[in-house]
Image (cartoon, helix red, strand yellow):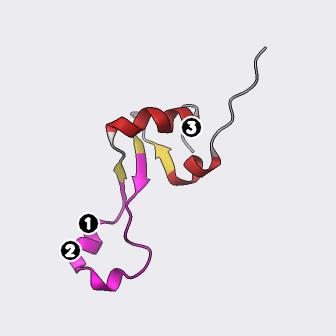
Amino acid sequence: MGTKIKTHKGTKKRFRLSAKGKAMHRQSGTSHLAKGLSKKRRRNLRGTTAVAECMEPTIHAALNGHSY
């Protein structure tokens, strides 16, 4: 029997998989210095968004198909 594939812990902290299997992430630019952004920009940066399709296979491999 082969060795188990370990989950990449950095990826686990930054991404999660949606119910349909899309990789979701928090949008950048909101942690500090947001006062300089317009209210509209800050509002639109709330929540999560889907990762680019070209990055999804890499994230799926790092998470081994699990959603955390």
Identify which amino acid the numbered label 1 is placed on.
Asn
Position of residue 2 in the picture relative to residue 61 (left or right)? right
In which quadrant of the rendered view does residue 64 lie?
top right
Residue that mark 1 sits on: 44
Ranked by sequence position, the earlier of labels 3 and 1 is 1
Query: Looking at the image, which residue is at 57% across and 37% down?
Result: 63
Q: Residues within 10 Å of mark 3 (few under 14, many from 20)?
A: some
Q: Which residue is mark 3?
A: 62
Q: Residues within 10 Å of mark 1 (few under 14, many from 20)?
A: few
- Which label sits on residue 40? 2
Secondary-structure class at tag 3: helix
The residue at the point 56 percent across, 37 percent down is 62
Magenta highlight on residue 54: no
| Mark 2 touches mark 3? (CB < 8 Å) | no
Q: CA distance from mark 3 to mark 1?
A: 28 Å
Location of residue 16 with respect to 45 vertically, above or below: above
Q: Residue extending furthest bottom?
A: 35
> Which amino acid, by three-letter code, is at mark 3?
Ala
The CA distance from mark 2 to mark 3 is 34 Å
- Dot 2 crowding, Cα within 10 Å, few <14, some 14–19, many 20+: few
